[in-house]
Each structure stands twice: as C-alpha cells, then as structure tokens.
Amino acid sequence: MTLVSPNHRKPIGVLDIGSNTVRLVVYDGLHRTPLALFNEKATCALGAGLESTGRLNPDGVPMALAAIERFVHLARAMKVERLDVLATAACRDAEDGPAFLQEVERRSGIRIDLLTGEEEARRAAFGVLCSMPDADGIVCDLGGGSLELVMVSGMNIGRFTTVPLGVLRLQENSHGLRQRAQDMMEDRLKSVDFLPEAKGRHLYAVGGSWRTLAQAIIAQLDYPIHVLDNFTLPYAQALKLIGQISRQPARSLEKMKGVSRRRAPQLPLAAQLLEVLLRKAQPESLVFSVYGMREGQFYLSLPDTMRDGDPLLSAATEWARAAGRFPEHGRELMEWMSPLFPDETPHLARLRSAACLLGDIFWDEHPDYRAEQAFLKVLRLPFMGLSHTDRAGLALAVYHRYSAEEDLPLVTKAAALLTPDRTRRVRTIGAALRLGHTISGGAPGLLARTRLERGETTLMLGLPAGDPIYYPELFSKRFERLAAELGLTPKIITV
C-alpha cells in the first residue's frame, strides 16, 4: 500500500538552522497534512559556548556549512518547488551569526530568513495548531538556544515570549549542578507572567529533547502506542515521572530504552525545565507534540482555504484516494450506518468518518494477515489531530472490519485504553463496515438502495426486492453479527 498521493505534487522543503541541529524536511507538496518524504538532521551544536563567548561554536560552524550545502543540493535533486531556509536563536544571538549566514548564502546560493524570537514562537505555535486545531493552553518549544512560550486557543495565538533557556545554554551555565540550573530557570522565567493562564488547560511540549523524554516514558510504562505525537499524561503523573528522570544521572539514562547517547547528557536538564514549567503552569495535562516550527512554516504557506481543513479527515481522504478501490464508498458507508449511532457527538462522528474512509485501503494485504496489518498501520500512521485514545479506537474499528477476535496481544493492550462503551462502539463500526462492504462489494451507489433501522429491540435491514445483488444468504451472518454487537434481534425485509 502506498501512502504517497498519486497527484504528483511538487515537494516543499524546510531547512532549519537551529542552535543544536541543522535539519532538512521535504514534504509531499502542499496539502492539509504535511507528509515528510525526507527528514534528516546533523547535530552541529552551533549554540554551544554561545553564553560565554557570544560567538557560534567554532567546531560546529564547518559541520553546519557542510550539512547545509548537502541539504540544499539534496533539495534541488528532489526538485522541490520551494525551499524555505530558517535560522533561529544561535544565529540570532551570536555576534558572528550574520557573517555565518552570509557565508551560507554565498556557498549555497540560497536566501535565509533569520527569524526573530516572535517569528520563531509564532511558527512553533502554528506547528502544534496544524496538528491539533483545538489546542488550548501553552505551547513550549525547547531548542538548543531558546525556549518559546505561546498561549493558544481556538486556532488563535495569544501572549508569547522567547526565553534564553535552550538546553545548550543550560548545559553550559549549570556545569552539571542541579541547583545552579534551577536558579537559572527560575530567574529567566520570572518575567513570564502568563504561565498561570495555562492552569487547568494543557501544556504542549515541543522539541527534540522533550521528544526523547516522551520516548523514555513510553518505554518505562510499556505503553501500547509508540507514536510520540499527542502522547498525553495527566498533570500529577507527568510531574512524578518527569521529576524522577530529571534527578537521574545522564549515564543511567543512556541505558534507558528510547534514549540516544547523544541526547542523554541534556535529558536531565530538559526534564528539570519541563518540571519547572509544569509546576508554574499547573495544566490539566502534558501533551507531547512532534510538530513545531518547521510544520508551522509549512502550515503558514498553505492557502487559506486549505488551512481550514480537518487534518485527520484530509489525510484519510488522501489515503483512500491513493490506496482504496472505490474511494467514494467511504462517505456512503458513513451515511448508511448513521442510524446505528443516534446520539453521536461531532467528535465521535469525525472518528467514524475516518474509519469509513480507511476501511478499504488494506484490501491488497494477504487475507490471513489483513486484520493485523490494518490495525498496526492505522495505529502507527502519521495522523495529525488524534489523541492516543482516539488512535487506538480508530485502529480497532478498522481491525474489526476484518476480524471479530481480539486475540493479538497488542490489540488487547490497545483495547485497554478504551472504556467499555467505546469498545462496543468501535466493534459496532467494524461490523457495520464489514457488512456494508459485503453487501455492495465496495461498488458505489449500491448501499444507498438499502437501509438500516435501529429499534428498541430489533435491527432491521431493508433490501430491494428481486435484485440478485442483494441476495441475503450471502451476508446474513454478518448482519447477525452487527445486530449482536448492538444487543438487538436481526430482521431482514425486502421492499
């Protein structure tokens, strides 16, 4: 199954010259959900030593020049339609930053946007909003040189600031002393008076160091979903786990699953800073986001009409078009089974719509493994706008489109994330998908000639009389299974 759109849109590149890393991401054209075709970074640590010398790291400069030159040539070879090159805190704050950027432009023939702290914060916020349009709280984007803090609500950006608290600055100034790092954090966050506005809302953690922290926590919890985006912890649990990691020596963290040796020295400081922010903000929950400044740049380049799209349904539609046999059938299934869910909320209807769109894109998998492969792929696909509970529910709905069993260990673990009512719901969606595809063969226009009616004790399926397509013996067992999921008596009538 391919997940690349067949429309052959020209790719879009974003090259980020950061304080710790230089990274190129090339996206599969301009559409609502950024799909990365290429993602590579070079750790150059341009901001190392900046706090004491005021200059870029002399060891990192040649590495960064070589990496940027490579990335620019790669982007050209990939025939990107546009390459946005952004420089952030280290180049902004270093006295030799402008000269370095001039040399980059001279060597590579590109134009670089040196972002202000405001511009960097704005892009970080829109990166989160690109994924989670309903984000409400404070976006905290931790880089090597700076920390961006932005209030967001309802696709609107509120108060924001940039603070010189990147992990490289913390590492340089603290000299391995926890209390010294604590004093620096407290002192530089003193002026951020809007942190308490996040109380009872959400704190969105963005940046490579915090992604590593999320990986470590997922490994410790033996959590069933290893997708980092939208991994969420309640406030009390987040404070406890992150506090524990912040007090561990870097050497012990190197042995922790999910932690790279390169990130380990910075992880206690990154965890300590997050612990401080959590205590000051007291959010309802901590949410990790893998989308930040680069995705914000991508999102801001979209046409206005495209920005308003739902990221989940846009992606599901793209994949249905790319890999489904009859893409339009998903919307027919959505309408056809709606009588089964009379009290459905808009949020749950959105998830059911995604399941209907995705329900046929695994048709070319081997029948013996189709259910398992469908479950694993939906569980791990790069969806935006999905909480982990919703991701598990969507994967299980598509799984039950192919199988009624739950005997796979990972399926059982994922099901444990759902309430009993939610479990019954996704099983019902799966059974309805299986029945709908069996009745119509996936061909468009046929389901509309049938109807489902849910009564107090009976589930009725109405079929056209005298049409050989709707021979009930071929799908009566699947209709009985759907009725059983609802606790109703099945009844087939012809009209």
Image: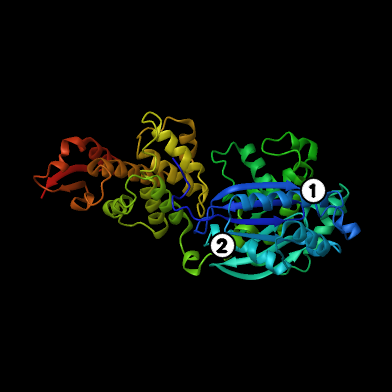
Residue 110 visible at all? yes
Residue nearer the viewer, 108 or 215:
108
Q: Which mark is residue 263?
A: none
CA separation in Å, label 1 and label 2: 29 Å
In this picture, residue 353 sits left or right of residue 141: left
Mark 2 residue type: Tyr
| Residue under the image location 64 percent in, 63 percent down | 123
Question: Could you tell me residue 156's position as x and y percent?
Answer: 57, 70
Residue 290 visible at all? no
- Label 1 vs label 2, nearer the camera: 1
In this picture, residue 26 sits left or right of residue 245: left
Q: Secondary structure at mark 1?
A: helix
Question: Could you tell me residue 200's position as x and y percent?
Answer: 60, 61
Residue nearer the viewer, 433 or 404:
433
Q: Earlier in the sequence, mark 1 or mark 2?
A: 1
Mark 1 residue type: Met
Residue nearer the viewer, 161 or 413:
161
Q: Which mark is residue 299?
A: 2
**How many C-alpha atoms fall within 10 Å of the one at disc 1: few (<14), some, or many (≥20)?**
some
Question: Could you tell me residue 120's position as x and y percent?
Answer: 69, 64
Image quadrant containing the N terminus: top left
| Residue under the image location 13 percent in, 46 percent down | 493
Q: Are marks 1 and 2 in contact (CB under 8 Å)?
A: no
Q: Secondary structure at mark 2?
A: helix
Question: Could you tell me residue 331's position as x and y percent?
Answer: 32, 54
From what the image shows, is residue 122 above or below residue 385?
A: below
Residue nearer the viewer, 235 or 405:
405
Q: Which mark is residue 63?
A: 1
| Residue under the image location 8 percent in, 45 percent down | 466
